[in-house]
Image (tube, rainbow, N blue to C red):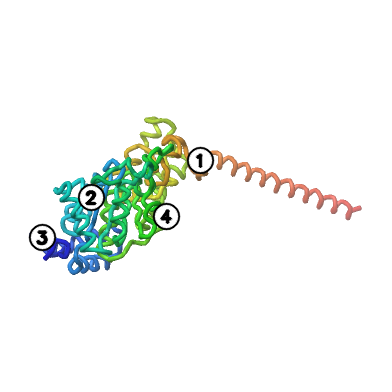
């Protein structure tokens, strides 16, 4: 049986994994994807019966941080994703083959798995001077990208580089580094932005496609809704401090030590869509805001060109409950006092009018 035609289950059984452990893995994977309890059985069924999906992983202009993140996935473990769930046929960063032997794999995959393989792209193609700023295997990367995209089932744009352009496309962008969707326009593209994306978000996208044989539901920008439908601000554990008007004013001030909101220090959480505050990093241990640094908005388009990471976004109005409690109390007391005074004046006027009426009747 060919490597690409084996199922995930047949591979792990050969490795000595028990069926009990297999179902535990499926349950953890369903949970990490935010799916219901019934999804675990669907995942198990898919991994038992469906052949592993061939994946071609290509690198353009990038720093390899997406790969570095991917290999640190905990749910599922990257070894399970790469060695069992998918058939990673080509990745010039981690593959043993090199040179002509490696390039031959691309042609073989196109021929054997036409319309069935996933093209995962890390980085982006520079278009200036015919793409000569990124040469891969003796050819401009943009040429190889177009060639492999032609017969792919779908394309995954890993990270901010492939999704938006990232630092390579920051002004003045001398190489004309360009996002994948501006070059490939006739194939479905899943954008998984971030610099880098969260490891479990990356493996989660791969797991979903492997399990259900389709792309996850995407938002209008092409991002998986399961991970990019909410702002970091919406689920941030410091959100109550924002609503209360409690902010860090200077690094390492008393408010910082108390864990107050980092909005005034430039945190971009209110405008950044990602799963950092829910999935978190390093196996769910932490994320930048929890470590005391504001979000820099790395999963948003053009974040390098939007000013300093430490500039406040704008004047967002918060509730300011604790901060303004005394003022609210004083205003309320003033309002009550004014109401009491007005009521007393009206009562006195009525009494005076009644006395005058009584006096007139006596006369």
How far apart are the two marked residues, 2 and 1, measured between alpha carbons? 35 Å
- Disc 3 element: loop
Estimate how packed mark 1 is, as few (under 14), some (14 to 19) or many (20 or more) residues with alpha carbons within 10 Å: few
- Disc 1 element: loop
How far apart are the two marked residues, 1 and 4, measured between alpha carbons? 24 Å
Where residue 316 sits: x, y (%)? Answer: 51, 43
Nearer the N terminus, badge 3 or badge 4? 3
For residue 241, side relative to residue 339 (left or right) = left
**Res. 207 visible in picture:** yes
How far apart are the two marked residues, 3 and 1, measured between alpha carbons? 53 Å
How far apart are the two marked residues, 3 and 4, measured between alpha carbons? 39 Å
Q: Is label 2 in contact with label 3 (beta carbons under 8 Å)?
A: no
Mark 4 lies on residue:
221
Viewer-nearest residue: 342 or 235? 235
Mark 1 lies on residue:
314
Where residue 266 sits: x, y (%)? Answer: 43, 37
Nearer the N terminus, badge 4 or badge 2? 2
Estimate how packed mark 2 is, as few (under 14), some (14 to 19) or many (20 or more) residues with alpha carbons within 10 Å: many
Residue 361, placed above or below residue 335: below
Mark 3 lies on residue:
17
- Disc 2 element: loop
Residue 184: quarter of image: bottom left
Q: How many marks?
A: 4
Residue 21, placed above or below residue 232: below
Nearer the N terminus, badge 2 or badge 3? 3
Mark 2 lies on residue:
73
Q: Is label 1 in contact with label 4 (beta carbons under 8 Å)?
A: no
Q: Is label 2 in contact with label 1 (beta carbons under 8 Å)?
A: no
């Amino acid at each position: 049986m060919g490597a690409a035609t084996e199922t995930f289950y047949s591979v792990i059984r050969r490795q000595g994994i028990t069926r009990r452990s297999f179902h535990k893995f499926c349950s953890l994977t369903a949970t990490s994807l935010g799916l219901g309890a019934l999804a675990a059985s669907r995942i198990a069924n898919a991994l038992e019966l469906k052949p592993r999906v061939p994946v071609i992983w290509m690198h353009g202009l990038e720093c390899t941080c997406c790969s570095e993140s991917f290999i640190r996935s905990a749910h599922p473990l990257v070894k399970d994703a790469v060695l069992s769930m998918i058939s990673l046929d080509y990745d010039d960063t981690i593959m043993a083959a090199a040179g002509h032997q490696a390039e031959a794999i691309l042609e073989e995959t196109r021929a054997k798995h036409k319309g069935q393989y996933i093209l995962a792209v890390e980085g982006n193609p520079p278009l200036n001077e015919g793409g000569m700023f990124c040469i891969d295997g003796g050819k401009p990367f943009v040429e190889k990208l177009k060639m492999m995209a032609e017969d792919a089932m779908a394309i995954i744009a890993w990270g901010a580089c492939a999704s938006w352009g990232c630092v390579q496309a920051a002004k003045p962008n001398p190489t004309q580094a360009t996002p994948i969707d501006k070059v490939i326009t006739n194939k479905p593209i899943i954008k998984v932005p971030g610099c880098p994306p969260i490891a479990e978000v990356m493996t989660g996208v791969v797991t979903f496609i492997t399990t259900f044989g389709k792309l996850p539901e995407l938002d209008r920008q092409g991002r998986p809704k399961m991970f990019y439908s909410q702002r970091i601000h919406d689920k941030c554990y410091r959100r109550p401090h924002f609503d209360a008007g409690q902010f860090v004013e200077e690094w390492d001030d008393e408010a910082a030590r108390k864990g107050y909101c980092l909005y005034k220090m430039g945190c971009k959480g209110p405008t950044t869509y990602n799963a950092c505050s829910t999935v978190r990093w390093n196996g769910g241990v932490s994320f930048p805001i929890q470590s005391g640094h504001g979000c820099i908005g790395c999963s948003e388009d053009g974040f390098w060109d939007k000013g300093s990471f430490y500039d406040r976004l704008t004047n967002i109005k918060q509730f300011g409950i604790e901060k303004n409690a005394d003022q609210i109390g004083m205003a309320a007391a003033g309002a009550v006092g004014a109401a009491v005074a007005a009521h007393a004046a009206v009562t006195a006027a009525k009494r005076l009018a009644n006395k005058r009426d009584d006096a007139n009747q006596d006369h």
